[in-house]
Image: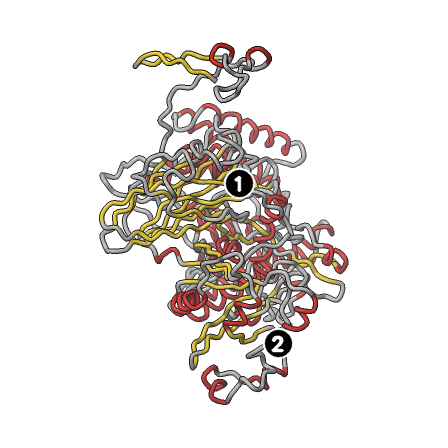
Amino acid sequence: MEINELHQLAQLAVKYDDIGDFNNAIIYYSKAANQIFKLIENKKISQKYKEISLKYLNRCEELKKHVKPATEQNDSFSFVMKALEYDEKGNYNEALNLYTEGAELGLLELKSPNNPQKIQKLKELTSLAIERAEKIKSSLNTNNQGYNNPSAPILSDDEEKVEEEINFDFLNKIFPKVPINEFSLVSLNNDQSTSQIKPNTENKNNGKQQRRRWSDQKKKNFGELSQNEISVLATTSLINNRKYIPFIEECDLKNESFFLPIPFTDKDGLLPLSEKQKKNLKGWLRPNEFIKDEPKIIDKIDSGTIKQTIVSDCSFVASLAIAARYERRFGIKLITHIIYPQNKNGDPLYNPSGKYMVRLHINGIWRKIIIDDLLPIGKNGELLCSYSQNRSELWVSLLEKAYLKVMGGYDFPGSSSNIDLHSLTGWIPERIPIRPDENELFDASKVFERLFTHFHQGHCLITLATGHLDKSEQERTGLVDAHAYAVLDLRKIDGKCLLLVKNPWTHLRWKGRYSESDSATWTPELCAKLDYNPKDAQQFDDGVFWIDYPSVCAFFDVFYVNWNPKLFPFSYVLHSSWHAGMGPIRDLYTIGENPQYLLEVNNKHGTASVWILLTRHITDKDDFANNKEYITVIVYKNEGKRVYLPHEPKPILEGTRINSPHYLCQLIVRDPGTNKFTLVLAQYEKMKTIYYSLRIFSSSEFKCGNIPSPYKYHKKETGNWKGEMAGGCGNDSNGGNFRLKNPFSILNLKMGVMKMNF
């Protein structure tokens, strides 16, 4: 495909330019420029791309001043670069031969280097060639299983055509900058007047469904993303002054280059550190510099190996722990499959080049986060970030680095586990307050039964969090103030409800009933049923403990639960914005200008469960740390008509406004047939424009769409109402002439004339 060929030529040109191989850079810049002229001549792309081709040609002329015209290259560098090309395309036999020749030449060049400054680069290049050759040879001997790069999906002829057209949509933003090494950059412009990335919605395959370009798109029977939605997602791609573009599976897994001739360094990779990290930092090192054995991404997934250090991200580490526990219990790749590169089995691979991509669900969609493997090391050689106690594993540290890069750095202000797990898994976040003063409807027994049932069915992930605990209470209970804990298990034994809980610090446990020191409670029968020996637990504090449910309700503040969205056969998502100037600052008296949506549920099965998730997009660390936007969803059953007064009609669901990025509303529909509802977004003291995603999950078929305002005509009149013009009102003893003095306007309607007094 000509468009894809152009993209590859541009990538190679910048790749050679960035690493100093100017002869090859000149060749590929020239080829890319000629390809652009050819496509313009054939009217396959716009004339505006001529500017890009001229940049490439100018770069060629600049490079020619410093190098001689390239002749046939037979050095180790050329062989390895060519091998990388074949490797990434899946031509492993050719790649193996070229890696072997490149390694042999590299070893010869090391014996008599022309330039001593290139010795280190030659060593790295030769090492890469040897390592990659061995891995390819091994994988070829085992029928291509193991270390192969993920291959592109096989497309039919029709799909090939669609792929080419879609790549054309990306062309305007996908050209790498000269000479900066940004191989696969896609930039979403905030300016709506410029061209945007837009999914191909035309059906050209005689009814055959087209490949969707946005991996998170689930708009069943409601069309594709609108231009406004794309603009919203583009605007909120800029997070903490860095852009995080959508993860597009077909594009990113095919075009992202991972295996490079020199170690990859992310220009934003040295994340801001917390104060404790700064005091103890010795430097930033790559895994092969502090791991004695061969580094691995994952050796054996286990929640017990995950350890939090001095970064204040207990909720994130607790989230990793329960996700790892889930993978171990159910054999389903929940978070390990979001790390790239991967082999054909979807297992993440250690990359000696140090470049990784992590897929996170941020601000409404899955986004790609590129990181390097430089990690902060302390003065005693210890990691200053979270890590796996299986020291050869990297998955914990890499996932933490990717997440905290988006969140602004290791100086993380803290979060909650349902927010973190939503980013890691895309699962639906729910917050269940435990304390009676916040949740008068909390029914302890019903909550435990619900969580117990669904936990063992693999439907949900659960964490706990404490609130404020004074020092004496912390000493007495062993619990940490405002801290997240992972729930590893729930049990019902002999009428008792118990939870197995882990402190992400991997030390400091609960001291109350059912703790390891509670000898009176731990009978031989109970120990046998739980396969637990408190005496063994006393020997080593790993932060894992049993606690009874009444103690949980007494000392913890909230359950954070994330639900598998696959529980719902029907789902829908829309992305929009609510401008600061739309409607009053407070919507306690009127909600007529609030965003409102019609929800029409077709209840065919007696009872329908509908969950409505409102997610506010956050783009700044300070906003996350000091979130002052209190949001909620109000539900009315009024045939889907627009609502103007908050309590006319009376809402059937009105949630508390909370300053969290996520608000979940759970609606049970019992009336059979078609039920129409109005969903109204509300917030307390609206101060600025908010961008949001509204997701609906349902057990029954439904429709959802915007309810437009019926008022099409607007006119504003200005004037004065003071002095002699202020006549008071009819109830005022001094205002007998208010009808003569007060300002009045005449409103002419088609039905007649109306005189209005103020």
Residue at which label 1 appears:
684
User: Does dot 2 land on a helix, a strand or a loop?
Assistant: loop
Query: Which residue sits at x=66%, y=69%?
Result: 473
Query: Which residue sits at x=61%, y=64%?
Result: 387
Name which quarter of the figure residue 509 lies in. Answer: bottom right
Residue 386, position as x, y percentages in the image: 62, 62
In the image, residue 326 sits, relative to residue 690, either above or below, namely: below
Residue 698, position as x, y percentages in the image: 33, 51
The one of 347 and 236 positioned closer to us in this rendering: 236
- Inter-mark Cα distance, 2 to 1: 41 Å
The one of 156 and 197 positioned closer to us in this rendering: 197
The answer to whether residue 640 is visible is: yes
Mark 2 and mark 1 lie on one chain; the one further toward the N terminus is 2
Query: In this image, 80 relative to 163: left or right?
Result: right
Residue at which label 2 appears:
511
Residue 71, position as x, y percentages in the image: 57, 40
Query: In this image, 422 relative to 415: left or right?
Result: left
The answer to whether residue 339 is visible is: no
Amino acid type of disc 1?
A: Tyr
Which of discs 2 and 1 lies nearer the camera? The answer is 1
Q: Residues within 10 Å of mark 1 (few under 14, many from 20)?
A: some
User: Does dot 1 land on a helix, a strand or a loop?
Assistant: strand
Q: Residues within 10 Å of mark 2 (few under 14, many from 20)?
A: some
Tag shown at residue 393: none
Amino acid type of disc 2?
A: Lys
In the image, residue 401 sits, relative to residue 530, either above or below, namely: above
Residue 617, position as x, y percentages in the image: 51, 43
